[in-house]
Image (tube, rainbow, N blue to C red):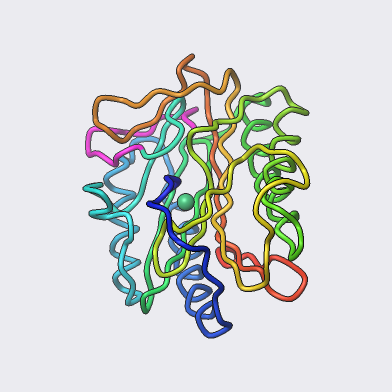
Amino acid sequence: MGMPARPREVTIKRPDEIARMRHAGLILVEVLEALHRELRPGITTADLDAVAEQMIRAAGAVPSFKGYRGFPRSICASINDEVVHGIPSPRRRLYEGDVVGLDVGCIWQGWHADAARTWSIGPASRQVQELIDATRRGMEAGIAAVLPGNRLGDVGAAIEAVAHRHGYGVVRPFVGHGIGTEMHEEPSVPNYGKPGTGMRIETGMCFAIEPMFTLGRDEVQLLDDGWTVVTADGSLAAHFENTVAVTDGAAEVLTQA
Ligand code: MG
């Protein structure tokens, strides 16, 4: 999930706190692998939500999205022109050729992790696969810039550069964020920026890095359900997210095997 929280201080996490976030992250890795295996034509997004919630609770964790500002489900499932925050439904069936972004978060012993992946149902066209791959590479480029001494503008610029190389839109109203004892902490981490500007990154900070790229323009609209964000021009969107901790000299990805 990617929404800014009310202003709070940026917190530095101790190694034992990051260890709890790492545990939460590994639960999400297993959930996302299971959801990937479930993806096939005919399955509904409510089916996927049920799998995720059951696995999170079986692992002794809590699904952080459920009840968050009234969100009714444990995952977000966003199909095709839906960018983020799609609400799982027994009426939303996946079809061959769909592109689905799955976003999931959990709390383990009070500490959060948040992660998202985008997959196609069946083989994707070259154009669609390139969007998916570039969005993942945008996330990875952003994470590579999460270094002590760097600034948030370095992270955003690295992400944006990947999108611009392909001519993709970069969704701007929804951004990455600090994460810890709350899903959304300060600071906001935009997927665009100027190198050398913004807050300085320090060891012990934790961030969710989550670019959203589109095949078209970057404008988005909110649907009447109050949650689902779609591209204004109807173009396809992709979303990837990892939770990372700034450790000695590098970013450790907490939501990756
Ligand atoms: Mg998030």
In the figure, 20 relative to 228: above or below?
below
Locate residue 36, reporting x and y percent.
48, 51
Residue located at (34% from left, 32% from top): 228
Q: Is residue 257 visible?
A: no
Locate residue 49, reporting x and y percent.
31, 51
Q: Is residue 214 visible?
A: yes
In the figure, 162 relative to 80: above or below?
below
Residue that extends furthest to the bottom in the rendered view of this protein: 16
In the figure, 74 relative to 106: above or below?
above
> Residue 184 versus residue 60: which sits nearer the camera?
184
State the image quarter where residue 90 is shown: top left
In the rendered structure, the answer to whether residue 173 lies left or right of residue 245 reads left
Range shown magenta = 86-99
Total marks shown come to 0
Residue located at (70% from left, 31% from top): 163
Residue located at (34% from left, 58% from top): 52
Locate residue 62, reporting x and y percent.
30, 68
Main secondary structure of the magenta stretch: loop
In the rendered structure, the answer to whether residue 114 lies left or right of residue 245 reads left
Is residue 147 highlighted in magenta? Answer: no
Locate residue 2, reporting x and y percent.
45, 46
Residue located at (70% from left, 51% from top): 140
> Residue 230 versus residue 152: which sits nearer the camera?
152
For the C terminus, the quadrant is bottom right
> Residue 61 versus residue 248: which sits nearer the camera?
248
> Residue 27 versus residue 200: which sits nearer the camera?
200
In the rendered structure, the answer to whether residue 172 lies left or right of residue 227 reads right
In the figure, 226 relative to 156: above or below?
above
Is residue 94 highlighted in magenta? Answer: yes
